[in-house]
Image (tube, rainbow, N blue to C red):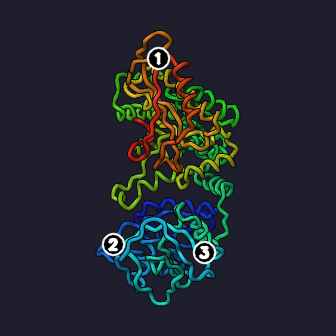
């Protein structure tokens, strides 16, 4: 584990993940735990401080989530945010009541004690983001007010190393919020910011070597950044004890299969099995039009091919996969804890639990941007480091309706144009994903002097931090025009191009 860490106890705020991300931006390891985690889970991290997240409940309601007793007994610095501050006040002898005037949105906080370690070096007046209908009406014994707003007399409070703030420092609408979190991590908790991509690699290599010993490891390599980073990390740790299996399902974008083989077998000298199985996958998809049925068919066939190739390697003890932290958080959030299931990662197609391997998940506590940083540190080429997320079932879920070889070729040609024009405009780092979707819709068009009745391509481009929410990308008009003109002129069978301007939610990034 990292030498220094801060724990965020999650009370159900929509911003809990953001707190973790903002603390990590200061190179301090931070992990999100359910608010009712046992003390043993908490102690596993040997934290230097604790942050209590916001949440939708009211501290004074019967049955409202409470701060575990060990939090205040352990004598570590604590920062309560919004509901977390109100819980701190209520449980330590203060009072929380409904506000006379609720505060949602921007407010101006007046810092009453600029010498406080939490606000040191920050402006006397700070724009902050509020989202609450309750407030602290009586401070616990020994606490003092550190800040106020027009409608909130106690916008921040403190006693020793216990701090509470009513506003949300983790959101972009609180411009100095990240510095509040830095001050808490550095000046209050005494962290030094030693958690970097380099230190993560060093710790992971050591941990993997201890776990694997002399055993054999297999890794499902899709060519995406997650599986690529896992493969290089494992290769650095155990060398030729690792074999990567690349299942070529025939559903990739143009030239990708060749690029993956070249990068890992030729450049990185990784043991790589290239299982060419495109015919098998197309046969499984024959006649299927339902999106979920497609995903299940591709996933099931992947498992069959992967297991066949793994069996050829003899006795293998370990399976490495690229599960990321958002997957873990999503399945252990308070409102989903009863399900308590870590979802299978798409890179390995949802492998069944009865496969005879011990899992190795070295990226389990990383966000996507942190994975990219590790990839760069490992020497992964930039085109792989910044490769846009790609669905496990590949182009099967971007060909709406039945998947055929002809439709796949049409889509590959259109998709290549979308990616080329976005890259030409220098926008490939600004968008989370940009791709084409082949619609089962035909419309009338005119080409030259003739009438056409051909298919439609939908262009999808979104911006996002982690894929959990997304906004449609406002691509420049000239870029959209170039994409449309090229697709209609260069891709046979297409006479219409439309642009998807739906955000997530209510839509999803992929169409299927």
Q: Is residue 205 visible?
A: yes
Classify the position of the N terminus by image quarter.
Answer: bottom right
Q: Secondary structure at mark 1?
A: loop
The residue drawn where x is 51% and y is 21% is 488
Q: Residue 493 has which mark?
A: 1
Q: Secondary structure at mark 2?
A: loop
Q: Nearer the viewer, residue 12 or 166?
A: 166
Residues at marks 3 and 2, CA–CA distance in whole angstroms: 28 Å
Residue 114 rendering spot, x and y as whole percentages: 61, 80
The residue drawn where x is 45% and y is 10% is 450
Residues at marks 1 and 2, CA–CA distance in whole angstroms: 59 Å
Residue 2 rendering spot, x and y as whole percentages: 61, 63
Q: Label 3: few (<14), some or many (≥20) within 10 Å?
A: many
Location of residue 95 with respect to 52 vertically, above or below: below
Classify the position of the C terminus by image quarter.
Answer: top left
Q: Quadrant of residue 271?
A: top right
Q: Residue 189 has which mark?
A: 3
Q: Answer whether labels 1 and 2 touch (C-beta < 8 Å).
A: no
């Amino acid at each position: 584990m990292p030498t220094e860490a801060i724990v965020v106890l999650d009370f159900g705020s929509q911003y809990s993940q953001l707190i973790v991300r903002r603390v990590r931006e200061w190179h301090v390891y931070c992990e999100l735990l359910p608010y009712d985690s046992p003390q043993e889970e908490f102690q596993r991290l040997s934290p230097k401080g604790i942050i209590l997240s916001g949440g939708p409940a009211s501290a004074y309601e019967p049955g409202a989530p409470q701060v575990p007793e060990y939090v205040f007994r352990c004598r570590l610095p604590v920062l309560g945010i919004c509901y977390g501050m109100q819980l701190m006040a209520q449980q330590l002898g203060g009072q929380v009541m409904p506000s006379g005037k609720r505060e949602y949105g921007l407010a101006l906080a007046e810092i009453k004690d600029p010498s406080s370690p939490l606000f040191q070096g920050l402006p006397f007046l700070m724009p902050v983001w509020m989202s609450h209908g309750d407030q602290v009406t009586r401070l616990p014994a020994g606490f003092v007010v550190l800040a106020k707003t027009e409608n909130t007399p106690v916008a921040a409070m403190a006693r020793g190393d216990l701090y509470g703030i009513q506003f949300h420092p983790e959101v972009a609408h609180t411009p100095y919020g990240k510095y509040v979190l830095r001050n808490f991590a550095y000046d209050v908790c005494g962290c030094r910011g030693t958690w970097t991509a380099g230190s993560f690699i060093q710790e992971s290599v050591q941990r993997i070597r201890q776990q694997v010993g002399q055993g054999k490891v297999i890794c499902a390599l899709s060519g995406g950044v997650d599986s690529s980073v896992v493969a290089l990390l494992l290769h650095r740790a155990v060398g030729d004890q690792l074999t990567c299996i690349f299942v070529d399902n025939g559903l990739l974008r143009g030239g990708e299969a060749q690029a993956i083989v070249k990068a890992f077998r030729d450049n990185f000298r990784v043991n790589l099995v290239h299982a060419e199985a495109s015919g098998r996958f197309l046969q499984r998809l024959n006649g299927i039009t339902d999106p979920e049925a497609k995903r299940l068919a591709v996933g099931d066939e992947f498992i069959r091919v992967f297991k066949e190739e793994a069996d050829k390697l003899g006795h293998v003890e370990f399976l490495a996969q690229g599960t990321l932290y958002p997957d873990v958080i999503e399945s252990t959030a308070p409102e989903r804890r009863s399900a308590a299931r870590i979802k299978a990662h798409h890179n390995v197609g949802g492998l069944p639990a009865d496969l005879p391997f011990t899992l190795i998940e070295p990226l389990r506590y990383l966000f996507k941007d942190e994975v990219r940083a590790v990839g760069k540190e490992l020497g992964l080429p930039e085109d792989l480091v910044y490769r846009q997320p790609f669905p496990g079932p590949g182009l099967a879920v971007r060909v709406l309706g039945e998947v055929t070889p002809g439709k796949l070729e049409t889509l590959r040609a259109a998709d290549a144009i979308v990616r080329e024009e976005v890259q030409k405009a220098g926008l490939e780092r600004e968008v989370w994903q940009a791709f084409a979707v082949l619609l089962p819709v035909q419309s009338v068009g005119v080409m030259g002097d003739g009438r056409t009745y051909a298919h439609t391509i939908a262009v999808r481009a979104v911006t996002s931090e982690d894929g959990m929410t997304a906004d449609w990308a406002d691509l420049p008009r000239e870029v959209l025009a170039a994409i449309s003109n090229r697709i209609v002129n260069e891709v046979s069978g297409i006479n219409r191009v439309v642009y998807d301007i739906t955000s997530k939610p209510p839509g999803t990034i992929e169409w299927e």
